[in-house]
Image: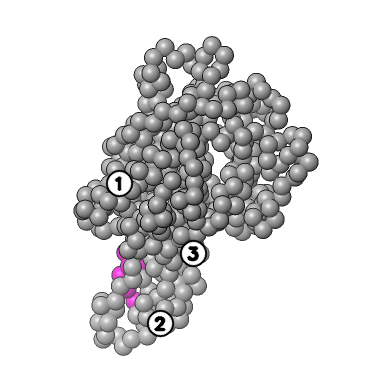
């Protein structure tokens, strides 16, 4: 369990808070690239780490991320005109480019140099893997852009989506790092004791710290062999995990496909979940059928969302449309969608969990170590040091796996080649 003051340090993300300062030291997704589909298109509202921002793609096709309100009279730039490499406020015509410079001030006399004295907060952005990434920390400490294998995978082999979760980012991240819950929460075939995660519901957890966070394995018995789910926790808020079944050609087929999530706090009580997956066999790209079938399985396909939003139709207001009869006869929860099941328990905990009331067991080792790493990183930033995982060199070569293997030695050695990035 955590002390209340430690819980506060880990969950509050606003500017000036300990965790807010830590999170601002990393590149984090601010939007999907598809939300800004064309130059001079409509601006998009962005909320991130408690700040209201506006994103736009300028005439050159480059993205700007600005404070959401004009510095003149605080009018909302969401209604602005995106034109000629800048966003123009509709209130008095002040115009700002993607760097935050005021490039036109038509409400002032032509001889005035006032516009040269006015700027708006602008954050550096970088596009990769179908996402717009933002860096909101000290400019002099900005690290190199992300270099995950996901970023290097061909677009034909990759898919990214987004959903909004109404709870604090930490309990969402903890749910992703918790491997033992999949034997219960995601048991969608009651009575099927041949399923790997149903046959052994108490995996042995081994966690090994790394320069980027940690790698860990949930190890289950699988007859004479072992089922190993080897994950990576990449600080501050990403989980990478293996997946071997993918939809292709009208049926399920064993192909090398990986997936994971990045949890980005919008504020203390709301989280954007960026869901990614990629096929890493160069010969097998992700088909549209595969993507749709997978998103449907997870409960985040277009038909699962409230139109025009990234919000789930199944949500806390309607008890995630739980089917109690299905819970008795078909699935452990009676809730449709793997990620929907996650949202149900994580949002159901309340906006911010009181971790001083928890009782952690051996299966919670990955969660406990993650909290320790974050507290250590917060302290490192307070001392003026670089936190773990900001340098892409530390994580660029990692890959998760999900395999049934002969454990003839330590899992890290047995799976060494499979856990090395190839793209």
Q: Residue at x 37, y 22 (%)?
A: 412
Residue 300: percent from the left, percent from the top?
61, 46
Q: Residue at x 41, y 31 (%)?
A: 216
Residue 37: percent from the left, percent from the top?
50, 55
The answer to whether marks 3 and 2 mark residues whose Cβ atoms lie closer than 8 Å is: no
Residue 98 on the magenta span:
yes
Q: Which residues are magenta?
A: 97-104
Q: Residue at x 61, y 34 (%)?
A: 184
Of the numbered discs in the image, which one, if any, rests on residue 73? Answer: 2
Residue 135 on the magenta span:
no
Residue 395: percent from the left, percent from the top?
33, 36
- Per the image, label 1 sits on a secondary structure element best described as helix
Whole-number angstrom distance, CA of label 1 to CA of label 3: 33 Å
**Which residue is under mark 3?**
45
**Which residue is under mark 1?**
376
> Is 341 situated above or below 66?
above
Whole-number angstrom distance, CA of label 3 to CA of label 2: 19 Å
> Is 94 situated above or below 300?
below
Residue 124 visible to an observer of this rendering: no
Q: Earlier in the sequence, mark 1 or mark 2?
A: 2
Q: Neighbour class for label 2 at 10 Å: few (<14), some, many (≥20)? A: few
Magenta stretch: dominant SS? loop
Whole-number angstrom distance, CA of label 1 to CA of label 2: 41 Å
Mark whose residue sits in front, 1 or 3: 1
Q: Earlier in the sequence, mark 1 or mark 3?
A: 3
Q: Earlier in the sequence, mark 3 or mark 2?
A: 3
Along the line of sight, the residue nearer the viewer: 234 or 295: 234
């Amino acid at each position: 369990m955590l002390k209340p003051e430690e819980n506060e340090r880990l969950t509050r993300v606003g500017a000036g808070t300990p965790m807010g300062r830590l999170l601002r030291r990393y590149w984090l997704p601010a939007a999907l690239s598809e939300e800004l589909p064309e130059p001079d298109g409509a601006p998009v509202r962005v909320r991130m780490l408690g700040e209201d921002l506006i994103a736009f793609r300028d005439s050159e096709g480059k993205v700007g991320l600005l404070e959401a309100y004009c510095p003149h009279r605080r009018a909302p730039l969401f209604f602005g005109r995106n034109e000629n490499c800048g966003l123009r406020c509709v209130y008095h015509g002040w115009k700002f480019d993607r760097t935050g410079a005021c490039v036109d001030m038509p409400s002032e006399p032509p001889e005035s140099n006032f516009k040269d004295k006015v700027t708006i907060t602008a954050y550096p952005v970088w596009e990769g893997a179908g996402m717009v990434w933002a860096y909101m920390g000290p400019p002099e400490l900005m690290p190199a852009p992300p270099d995950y294998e996901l970023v290097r995978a061909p677009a034909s082999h990759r898919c990214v989506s987004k959903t909004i979760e109404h709870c604090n980012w930490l309990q969402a991240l903890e749910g992703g790092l918790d491997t033992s819950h999949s034997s219960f929460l995601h048991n969608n075939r009651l009575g099927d004791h041949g399923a790997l995660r149903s046959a052994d519901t108490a995996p042995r957890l081994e966690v090994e710290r790394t320069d980027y966070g940690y790698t860990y394995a949930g190890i289950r018995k699988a007859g004479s062999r072992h089922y190993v789910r080897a994950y990576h926790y990449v600080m501050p808020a990403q989980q990478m995990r293996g997946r071997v079944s993918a939809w292709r050609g009208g049926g399920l087929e064993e192909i090398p496909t990986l997936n994971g999530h990045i949890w980005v706090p919008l504020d203390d009580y709301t989280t954007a979940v960026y869901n990614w997956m990629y096929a890493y066999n160069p010969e097998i790209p992700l088909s549209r059928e595969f993507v749709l079938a997978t998103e449907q399985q997870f409960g985040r396909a277009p038909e699962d969302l409230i139109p025009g939003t990234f919000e789930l139709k199944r949500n806390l207001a309607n008890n995630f449309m739980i089917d109690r009869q299905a819970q008795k006869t078909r699935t452990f929860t009676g809730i449709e969608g793997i990620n929907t099941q996650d949202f149900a328990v994580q949002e159901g905990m309340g906006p911010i969990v009181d971790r001083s009331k928890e009782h952690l067991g051996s299966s919670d080792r990955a969660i406990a170590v993650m909290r320790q790493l974050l507290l250590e990183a917060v302290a490192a930033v307070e001392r003026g040091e670089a936190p773990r995982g900001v340098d892409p060199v530390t994580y660029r070569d990692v890959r998760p796996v999900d395999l049934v293997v002969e454990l003839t030695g330590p899992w890290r050695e047995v799976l060494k080649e499979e856990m090395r990035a190839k793209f």
